[in-house]
Every structure is written in structure tokens, then in C-alpha cells.
Amino acid sequence: DQINLNEIHDTLVAVAFQAGAKMKAAKPSALTAGTKMNAVDIVTETDQAIEALVSSILREKYPSFSFVGEETYVKGVTKVTDAPTFICDPIDGTQNFVHGFPAACISLGFTLNRKPVVGVVYNPFADVLYTGISGQGSYFTDNASLEQGKGCGEKQRLPLTGGGKLGNLSTCLVGIEFGSERDGDNFELKIETFRKLAASKRDYGAMAGAIRSQGSAALNVCAVASGVMDCYWEGGCYAWDVAAGWCILTEAGGVMVSGNPGNWKPEVDERKYLAVRGASEGQKELIEEFWALVGE
Ligand code: IPD
């Protein structure tokens, strides 16, 4: 059977709105959230309830497709394969969510042969929706919940900023996150990368124009797809953090440089991702400058 990406997109958008309503209705607390890998890697009842809802809807509608979700992931067991696969982060930006900092979203990706071909990212607090379908472009919708069935949200093609020339790193707004891994090799790499981006050009030969951490990998990738962030790097992302945004980014002319595009194996790759926005020129040069500074 032919897989209908538009139908999958519509299903994911409808699911994202249901999830968004649950996020807005919840009263989460940083003091009662559960913990996973360490004290800052948190999970709430809402994360779990949304993932259960999303997986039951998707498994019922598409029983032969695989499902990978952050809250039911089992290391070494759960894998992204060549099969049609839904990849779900029920709440990306859980720390923001429990504090009421309004940068949290649901991130729903769909992959074929390990390539993200549909992406839906919805932030219910800002009521903005980012969507992409392979070969059909990607879009930003403001006042998105108004659109449900009525078509009255304002839908604009990405990138919002037109994708003009990229200058060198010192003219760029760069996203980078600490994430929840606070020790080990990945932590050292993040500290080193922050240091090199932040330090004066005199010290390392390059420096970032501005550095931002908004606390949601998916929203960072969507910001790069929109063109309002020039690039975003993180060491330590999982498939659910980037799958949806990756499709949205690519459809907006951007690139995911690391993470093995075309041969993505999220559970064995190094989990380092660099997203660069679409640009009329300067994309290749920025990537070269970035790797020369922080090491590929
Ligand atoms: C996390 C956020 C955070 C990023 C981490 C992610 P979660 O996702 O996106 O910004 O730095 O790498 O794990 O735990 O809130 O779903």
C-alpha cells in the first residue's frame, strides 16, 4: 500500500492539538516531577499521559507502523528501523513545562527508511505550529488552534525570514543547550563548545554573535527552520528531540549536518546534531567555520 504522507500529517496535527490541550490544562510542579537518568532529567504525569494517548491513537490507526516514544524508550531495545515509524516526544522542554516557561511543545515525527518525512511540532502556550512534509515544504501557523477545521490560523511558508545570506559565526544567533546530561564525555564536550562559542575571537579564532538556550531541542530546530536562529548545536539529543524538526528544517532549505543524514541510526550515532538554516549563500562556509572552531 502507498503511504499517504498528507494523511499522516493531518493525523499528527490533530493529535498534537489534543496533546496541547492536555499540556495547557495540567498543573505540573518542579517539586513533584519524577526523575529518570538524574535529578534534572524529569518526567511528569502529563508526559506519560500524552505519550499513552498519542501511541494509542497512532497504533489503532496505523497498526503495522512502529512507534518510538521518549517515555517508553528502553535503551538497547527500542530502535528506529527502516520501517515506517512514528517518533514522539510528548513534551519537549519538560523543565520549561514544570516552571511555566512558555517554550515547550509536542514533537511528532514520522520516518521512512530512517529518514524524517513528516514533522509536526506544536507549542500550545504560544499556540504556534510548525509542520513539514517531505517534498512539500514546511509551514508555521500562528494562532494555530483557531485553525482546527476552520482554516483561520495564519499559515506561512518557512523560512519566515526569506533565507538570505549567512555571514560568519560572529554575525550569527546560535542555539546550544546543556540538556540533562551533566557529567561524562558529553558534558565536557558541551562545556568546551559553550566556551569556544562564547570566548573572544582572539582566543579561538571565531566566536558566536549571540548564544541562546531556550530549553527545547525541537523548538530550536524549528527556530533554525524559521530562520530566526542561524544554527543550533547540541551533543546528547535523542531521536524524539530532532526527528520532527529535521523534516521541517530540511523542507525550509536548512540542513542537519551531523547525525548522519541519509543513514541516520539515532541509537548508535554519537547524538550530536548541528542544524543550519537555509541561506542563499554562506551555508557551507558557516559549517566549515563551526567545525573548525569546535571540532566535528
Ligand atoms: C530536552 C530538551 C532540552 C535538550 C535536551 C532534551 P525533554 O528534552 O529538548 O532542551 O537540551 O537534550 O532532552 O527532556 O524536555 O523532552
Image (spheres, rainbow, N blue to C red):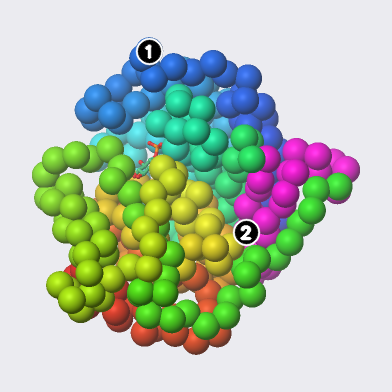
Instruction: Give the Cα separation between the discs numbered 1 and 2.
Output: 35 Å
Looking at the rendered structure, the number of numbered marks drawn on it comes to: 2
Q: Which residue is mark 2?
A: 132
Asked if residue 111 shows in the view, the reply is: no
Q: In the rendered view, would you say 182 is above or below 160?
A: above
**Residue at position x 18%, y 53% from top?**
191
Q: In the rendered view, would you say 120 is above or below 181?
A: below
**Residue at position x 43%, y 21% from top?**
44
The nearer-to-camera label among 1 and 2 is 1
Residue 55 falls in image quadrant: top right
Image region (quadrant) for ligand 1: top left
For disc 1, the neighbor class at 10 Å (few under 14, some 14 to 19, many from 20) is few
Q: Nearer the viewer, residue 263 or 281?
A: 281
Q: Nearer the viewer, residue 67 or 166?
A: 166
Instruction: Tell me residue 223's x, y (percent).
Output: 53, 57
Quarter the C terminus occupies? bottom left
Instruction: Tell me residue 28's x, y (percent).
Output: 49, 18
Horizontal arrangement in the rendering, residue 251 relative to residue 205 (left or right): right
Residue 14 falls in image quadrant: top right
Is residue 223 on the magenta stretch? no
Q: Nearer the viewer, residue 223 or 269?
A: 223
Precedes in sequence: disc 1 or disc 2: 1
Q: Which residues are magenta?
A: 127-151
Q: Which residue is mark 1?
A: 32
Instruction: Tell me residue 24's x, y (percent).
Output: 62, 25
Instruction: Tell me residue 160's x, y (percent).
Output: 65, 66
Q: Are marks 1 and 2 in contact (CB under 8 Å)?
A: no
**Residue at position x 57%, y 31% from top?**
54
Horizontal arrangement in the rendering, residue 205 relative to residue 174 (left or right): left
Horizontal arrangement in the rendering, residue 103 relative to residue 190 (left or right): right
**Residue at position x 55%, y 66% from top?**
227
Residue type at the position of mark 2: Gly
